[in-house]
Image (tube, rainbow, N blue to C red):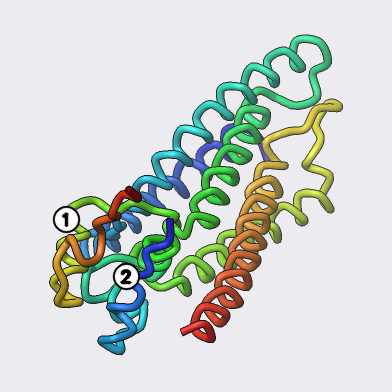
Amino acid sequence: MDFKSYFLGFGIAVVVACLLAVILKSKNPARYDERQKQVQAKAHKVSYYLLMILLVIYAIVDSYAKFCDTMTGVFICVCISIAVYASICIFGDAYTAVNQSKKSLVVTLILAGGFNLLVGIGNLIDGELVEDGLLSVGSLNLVVGVMCTVIGIVALIRHLVVKNRYAAESEDE
Amino acid sequence: MKNLAMKSARAAKDISQQELADAVGVSRQTISAIEKGDYNPTINLCIAICRVLGKTLDDLFWQPTAE
């Protein structure tokens, strides 16, 4: 798969995702409470500075030992930043809105993660991950798949922690 | 500092954290955090909680200073 067709597919996917998000949100807008907004603000700050640091590190590493093309490198930095943002929100119980169920998060992660992992593994088998000795755009699906998996694992851990804590609090009462 | 006054007022009304959270429009974890003293709510949320529990702000949120 060449760069142009990959970029076109990626662009179409982003547009479709944005349209779906706008349609779904207009029907049932997400409502976060004041504590959740505080946690999200902290997560935004941390992920923003992390992204800056990661991009600087990538730029330095890239200038000495190029290991991937520019789009892949930047995308990996963005994915790490998003994963950290989501993890902070999940651990602060601020990822799902008050009026939304956690099931929607799980379904989204399974669909997005599963699809990207499948395509990523397909690219790996076809040998499209590395081109001219550099990690190419074909690896982006695998990166997104891994990111969704990491967020899913964090959500699962948090779910188990909250479940146990709530059970303990209920016993106290 | 734990907010035991709010916890006991909620228990006296036989309301769960989830029920109180739904009544004031926040998540259950927010109510839990307020009771544990991990989060300081805004005055608007304090008033909403007081209204649901039938208490005053002094009853639930005033911390008397040790003299």
**Mark 1 highlights which residue?**
B44
Residue B34: x, y in percent?
Answer: 37, 61
Side of B4 where A126 appears, left or right:
right
Q: Are marks 2 and 1 on the same chain?
A: yes
Q: Chain of mark 2?
A: B
Q: Residue at x 24, y 51 (%)?
A: B42
B16 relative to B34, above or below: below
Q: Residues within 10 Å of mark 2 (few under 14, many from 20)?
A: some
Q: Chain of mark 1?
A: B
**Does dot 2 land on a helix, a strand or a loop?**
helix
- Say what amino acid the circle numbered 2 marks: Ala
Q: Quadrant of residue B12?
A: bottom left
Q: Residues within 10 Å of mark 1 (few under 14, many from 20)?
A: few
A153 relative to A47, above or below: below
Q: Quadrant of residue A95?
A: bottom left
Residue A67: x, y in percent?
Answer: 80, 24
Q: Which mark is residue B34?
A: none
Residue at the far top: name it: A63
Q: Which mark is residue B5?
A: 2
Q: CA distance from mark 2 to mark 1?
A: 18 Å
Q: Residue at x 52, y 82 (%)?
A: A172
- Say what amino acid the circle numbered 1 marks: Asn
Q: Residue at x 44, y 46 (%)?
A: A14
Residue A102: x, y in percent?
Answer: 46, 71
Q: Nearer the viewer, residue A63 or A120?
A: A63
